[in-house]
Amino acid sequence: MSYGSERSHLQSTRTNITWSAKGLDSFGCSRTNHKISGPMYLDISALLLFLFGRGTMAMVIRAELFQPGLQIVQPEFFNQMTTCTALFMVFGR
């Protein structure tokens, strides 16, 4: 195959590409329909709160266990956080 025929083959295949919606528009992020964007924002905020809450609890547990005898939080609160973190790890996403 010569260079000229290879180039014409590439040009012919390039023109047959069909473009589809990509990016944030395919998720409905550029639309102003409140029935779509409202629940989407609630889902995203709940997910971020869930992830940051888990991370904060894990860091407090690690800080508490960093050195023996170090008391950062009350023992009852530490037990509650450990239980919540374990439940998130078992039943969470």
Image (cartoon, grey):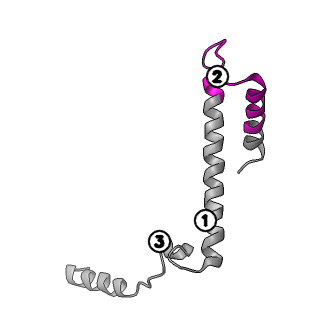
Query: Within the magenta stretch, is there residue 75?
Result: yes
For the residue carrying disc 2, how many other residues have a C-alpha within 10 Å: few (<14), some (14-19), or many (20+)?
A: few
Residue 77: x %, y % from top left: 75, 29
Could you say which disc has been placed on residue 23 in the image? 3
Q: Main secondary structure of the magenta part?
A: helix
| Quadrant in which the N terminus appears | bottom left
Q: Is residue 18 found left or right of 26 in the rendered image?
A: left
Mark 2: which secondary structure? loop
Return the residue at label 1. Answer: 41
Among numbered discs 1 and 2, the one appearing first in the sequence: 1
Foreground: disc 1 or disc 3? 1
Which quadrant of the structure image shows residue 66?
Answer: top right
> What is the magenta range?
61-85
What's the amino acid at mark 2? Ile
**Dot 1: few (<14), some (14–19), or many (≥20) neighbours within 10 Å?**
few
- The answer to which of marks 1 and 3 sits earlier in the sequence is 3
Q: Amino acid at mark 1?
A: Tyr
Q: Which residue is mark 2?
A: 72
Q: Position of residue 51 (x, y in %)?
A: 62, 47
Give residue 15's position: percent from left, percent from top. Answer: 35, 87
- Up the image or down, 65 lies above or below 43; here it is above
Q: Residue at x 76, y 38 (%)?
A: 84
- Callout 3: 10 Å neighbours few (<14), some, many (20+)? few
Name the mark nearer the viewer: 1 or 2: 2
Residue located 64% across and 43% down the image: 53
